[in-house]
Amino acid sequence: MDLKRLKKAYMIGIKGVGMAMLAQFFAGQGIEIAGSDTEEKFLTEAVLKKIGARVTEHFSEENIPADADLIVYSTAYTPERNVEVAKALKGKIKTLTYAEALAEVFNQKYGVAVTGSHGKTTTTAWLAFVLEKSGFDPSAMVGSFVPQFDGAGLVGKSDLLVAELDEYQNKLRFFQPRAVLLNNIDYDHPDFFKTKEDYEDAFINFIKKIPAKGFLVANFDDPLIRKLAPVNCRGKVIGYGSEAGTTGSFSGSAMKDGVYYSAYDIDQQNGRQYFKVRMETADEESDLGGFETSLSGKHNVLNALAVIAASIELEAPLSKIREYLGEFTGTARRMEMMGEFRGATIIDDYAHHPTEIKATLAGARQLYKDKKIITVFHPHTFTRTKALLEDFAKSFEDTDELVVLDIYGSAREEQGGVHSQDLIAKIKDQRSKIKDISYISTLDECELYLRNHVSRGDIVLLMGAGDVFRIGENLIGK
């Protein structure tokens, strides 16, 4: 795909996060953007409006411009269930899935991929922010709105592209990375990956594609990654982890040319995290000094280490890395402060997997030690909830009160097979320390409950990959 020849792109399902991210990049190349989606309101609409995209809020064969050079469609829509996709696949205009189109762009650049089960969005935006501020002029594609970018990415003039790559449906198979940041491997998407081994293989096969002159930045606190990375990557292996994770980091000849970064003296003060970083090779070690961030939780210290390691490997000055790492403020829907309602703080977070929930709540408890935390959880997909029910039940111990809404199902899956009340029953069976656990069916009912229930000083954490943030918008009058 020659980007310089593209004049007009039409995007089916344009409001999706990934699609809007790609639309913003295309618009930055001077490509005219049009597309279609449902009438449902998405957080991406501000980005689409900013780039001047013409969005039609219904699907019809007549929507597709005859003079489009490219049609991109979200795999949330199939030819059997969407008339536009059906027409596009039968027509003469070049038609690609979102992943195929993104790969066409990525593979023509010096592509740095950020992937893994959790933390992709924050790490992608953070790395791109540090590199952009350090003068690299990168492009970036992030799976969420980034306030400091005023959009879902950056359109730079250099050949460097930092992109968040999703493993779902094994989209990774389309990409040829020059470098990879691999945060973790934690079984997810059971509707597509039927076994843990299938899921792990998607990442193994991806890092095998890193060229000999490329590099892998890998979280060695994850025992599976620590085991798999050195033997499956042809390029340089750069590990990172907590201080405890250094043990055995250079055991075996596969790591003899590698580097390992560890964080220590981690401290939380006045809403910021402070930590020091040690860099080790097989022959020596050196102290890189202190760093700080406004992002809470140990998981964000690990994300910071990944950013530091990749930035150093790309030859960013350490002084600039230190400065801009601390200036990054995060992305939308990741512990995002929405505002206040009657003196209670309303926070929105995208966590929808047990590991993410644990990490987010641990960070919230670290930040709000003596506050009452009320978590409203909106389970996402029946397949995930059913497959990981035991793990979900163990994930909420750092909250004082838990409200569970009805499951937000995916259009791609069969509905049913598990209910939110099954999760509540499982939590209660474990004699959880959570003081109050309740089931509330809808967003509207939950909003009414919170209006009558929250008190000044409470922390209300709206959690899930669906539209649970609507409750917060209504409470604060946004």
Image: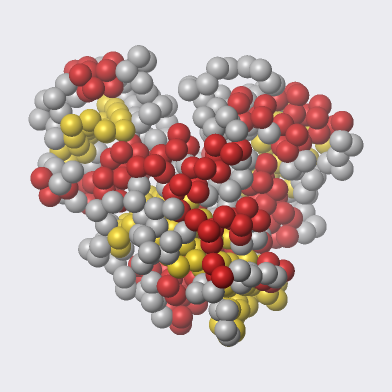
Position of residue 150 relative to residue 317, above or below, is above
374 left or right of 251 in image: right
For the N terminus, the image quarter is top left
Q: Picture coordinates of residue 125 (x, y %)?
A: 44, 58
Q: Residue at x 38, y 64 (%)?
A: 212
376 left or right of 157 in image: right
Q: Picture coordinates of residue 454 (x, y %)?
A: 73, 41
Count of marks, rendered view: 0
Q: Residue furthest right?
A: 431
Position of residue 453 relative to residue 272, above or below, is above
Q: Residue at x 27, y 17 (%)?
A: 86
Q: Nearer the viewer, residue 88 or 473?
A: 88
Q: Picture coordinates of residue 371 (x, y %)?
A: 77, 54
Instruction: Tell me if I can see residue 274 in this picture.
Output: no
Residue 420 image-quadrant placement: top right
Q: Nearer the viewer, residue 94 or 123?
A: 94
Position of residue 196 relative to residue 420, above or below, is below
Position of residue 329 relative to residue 29, above or below, is below
Tell me which colouring the rendered structure shows: secondary structure
276 left or right of 137 in image: right
Q: Residue at x 16, y 21 (%)?
A: 91
Instruction: Tell me if I can see residue 155 in this picture.
Output: yes
Q: Residue at x 56, y 70 (%)?
A: 253
Q: Nearer the viewer, residue 247 or 338?
A: 247
Q: Picture coordinates of residue 427 (x, y %)?
A: 81, 33
Q: Residue furthest front?
A: 253
